Image (tube, rainbow, N blue to C red):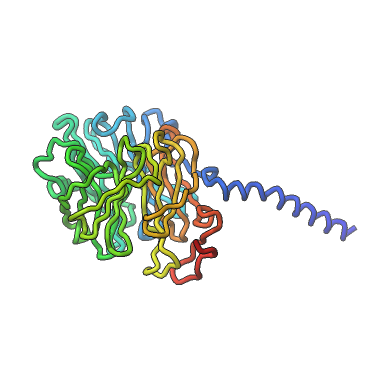
Amino acid sequence: MGSLNNMSMRTIYFVLALLAIPVLVQAQTRPIDEAVDLFNASSDEAIACYRIPALVTAPNGDLLAAIDERVPSCGDLKWSGDINIVLRRSSDAGASWSDIESVADFPDSLSASDPSMIVDAITSEIFLFYNFMDHTVEPDVYYLHMMRSLDNGATWSAPVDITPAITKTEWHNDFKFITSGRGIQTRTGKLVHTMVNLDSGLHLFASDDHGESWYLIDTPIEPGDESKIVELLDGSWMINSRANGKGLRWVHISSDEGLTWTSYPEPNLIDPGCNGSIIRYTAKRDGYDRDRLLFANAKSADKRENMTVRISYDEGRTWSEGKTIYEGGSAYSSLTILENGDIGLFFEKDDYTENVFVRFTLDWLTDGQDTYTPAGGRASKKGR
């Protein structure tokens, strides 16, 4: 009787294991099934919607997800007199998140919009940027603000108006804004970010002293709306740009820190005219086994749908077909790398009703063809 009970128990365990397999396969195949909806206005009647995600990994490993809290309507800064910047944080790689924290909340008629961040790996400081408008005193006039955090985003400094430093006087009434999402720090320590003036083109601004001062790199780049920048292995800069009405992304490359640019369309990266995300994942010179870039956008030529993440092993010259994260309505997105090498993505879902965070592995992204190993570890399991 005892052996029969043992056999019965083994049978039960085996059946339970079989039942668990589809769940595990589904989770490996569809990370959206484990998505966390971080900001959803349906839970608060006082908020019209949340939009414009920005995601970074803080120096201590915390994830910081910032976004617009749009109060009276879903309208952009130009059309809304009450938009705040809010944030949630995760200290366990996205498994759980803090309550919503207010970062920039002004009185009515003063609005803050389009958050973006840069993490300074040398000083461990985080810079948060947003666009600002006083709808009573100067309606339609855009100002560009910056805040700083020395404690991994737990507290933030008072906002500083950096508009005079990174724009021209004659731009005062122009439609200008800092691109949402994130900027970069180059290997030399320079902080670099993208800014758009719809009247004069895409521009960069930078800091050589860890955010103590900022300056405009006065070389207009076209075509280019909301854009992201990465540093390539040879030290050149590559911008990946939204280009409205063209059905694809544009790429701009500079080998002289933004003084001159070579621009070309990227037909393999179709795009409906929407903000995307591009980041460096790994580099051999940092001790990793391969050079990798990641790119996320709504992979469609004419609709904001089909959120997809692609990988490049040759510094953006070619890209994989990508892996679909969510087939439905998808818009702005922001990528980050978690401390353990997993990939985090924060994006607008289903006509901005949801703003979700998902995490997945390099192994999942490449269908088992490539696996993350820490710097100095073994090579990926399959070469490509």
Q: Residue at x 28, y 59 (%)?
A: 185
Q: Nearer the viewer, residue 364 or 52?
A: 364
23 horizontally vs 175: left or right? right
Observer-nearest of 232 and 279? 232
**Residue 35 visible (yes or no):** yes
Left or right of residue 29, residue 218 in this image: left
Q: Is residue 71 above or below residue 37?
A: above
**Residue 230: percent from left, percent from top:** 31, 55
Give the residue displayed 35% in from the left and 39% down from the top: 274
Q: At 80% across and 54% down in the image, what residue appears?
A: 11
Q: Quadrant of the N terminus?
A: bottom right
How many numbered circles does the render carry?
Answer: 0
Q: Is residue 45 above or below residue 152?
A: above
Horizontal side, residue 287 vs residue 14: left or right = left
Residue 121, horizontal then vertical, whole percent = 31, 62
Outermost residue toward the left in this view:
169
Q: Identify the residue shown where x is 36% and y is 41%.
A: 248
Q: Give percent across and percent down for residue 186.
A: 28, 61
Q: Position of residue 31 (x, y in %)?
A: 53, 47
Q: Please tell me whether residue 147 is drawn above or below residue 285 in the rendered image.
A: above
Q: Is residue 103 visible?
A: no
